[in-house]
Amino acid sequence: MTGRSEGYRRFAADSSLVLGGLAAILLQLGDPVVARGVAEHSSFARDPLRRLRSTLGYVYAVQLGTPAQGARAARRVDAAHARVVGARDAAPQLWVAATLVRVAQDAHTLLHGPLPPSVADEVHAAGADLGMALQLPNDAWPVDRAAFDRYWNATIPTLSVGDDARGVARELLAARAAPWWLRLAMPAAREFTALLLPPALRAAYGIPEHPRRAGAVLAVARVVARLAPRRLRELPARRLLRESESVRRAR
């Protein structure tokens, strides 16, 4: 999108933040409407990489692509939501968008340190696009970061991990349908995920806390994220945006 600072674009295109993806999903599943929709209609557990590509494609298109790319991505996601009861309601849409914004920032803080306040303000403002592209009312997104924090802190205690959420979480964390290399990475991914979840939610999912192991995983992740060239970290965003444009031209 035009009008964004270079600092914002670096943040939004940084694929190392995908390490927070599991935590974002588990937070989303704490909303019973989201959990039911995922359990009944989603391919998260059956084909996690396909679902990851779909989610990243939407986020990158809305936050980094042209207005046309963002609109096309929103139409695809909205069409999928049309089959799910409640998926178009404002409350679950707001919560899903909020988890994407909050977890990305928390992952950035763990890996690279806190964002400068000006960039954090941009990230918050851009977060509204993720929801409004899917018909979230214009006034639903918190007006500033302080309002977002109040919304987040008020919502966390209301989350409820039911049977649908636990069932999807078990499949995700077991990663039985994932490629072998992703299954090998899952123990480390679970430790990183535990660092990003509120304690009550982590306990509700039965994810144990291993401070020393999590500290070691975090140390390695920080080294890899900081040593990886920026061009490599931004490669998934560039590729997905190019693919989106290639599909449009082929039609």
Image: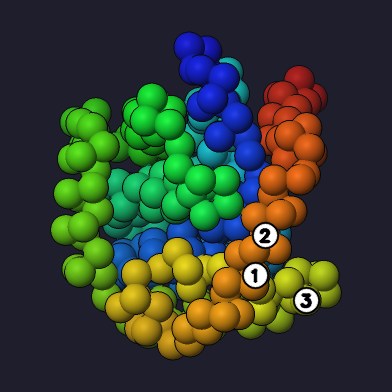
Badge 2 density bin: few <14, some 14–19, many ≥20, Cα 10 Å: some
Q: Residue at x 48, y 12 (%)?
A: 3
Q: Is residue 200 toward the left or the right of residue 107 in the image? A: left
Residue type at numbered disc 1? Val
- Residue 54 at least partly seen: no
Q: In the rendered structure, which disc, 3 or 2, sits on the residue that comes first in sequence?
A: 3
Report the quarter where the C terminus lies.
top right
Q: Nearest the camera: 127 or 117?
A: 117
Dividing the picture into quadrants, the one containing residue 160 is bottom left
Q: Residues under labels 1 and 3: Cα distance?
A: 14 Å
Q: Residue furthest right?
A: 180
x, y percent for residue 116: 43, 31
Residue in view at x 58 percent, y 52 percent: 111
> Which numbered circle lies on residue 221?
2
- Comparing marks 1 and 3, which lies closer to the viewer? 1
Which residue, given by chain and number where applicable, does mark 3 sit on?
184
Task: Say which element carries label 1.
Answer: helix
Res 191 quadrant in image: bottom right
Label disc, if present, on residue 217 of the rendered structure: 1
Q: Are marks 2 and 1 in contact (CB under 8 Å)?
A: yes
- Whole-angstrom CA distance, mark 2 to mark 1, is 6 Å
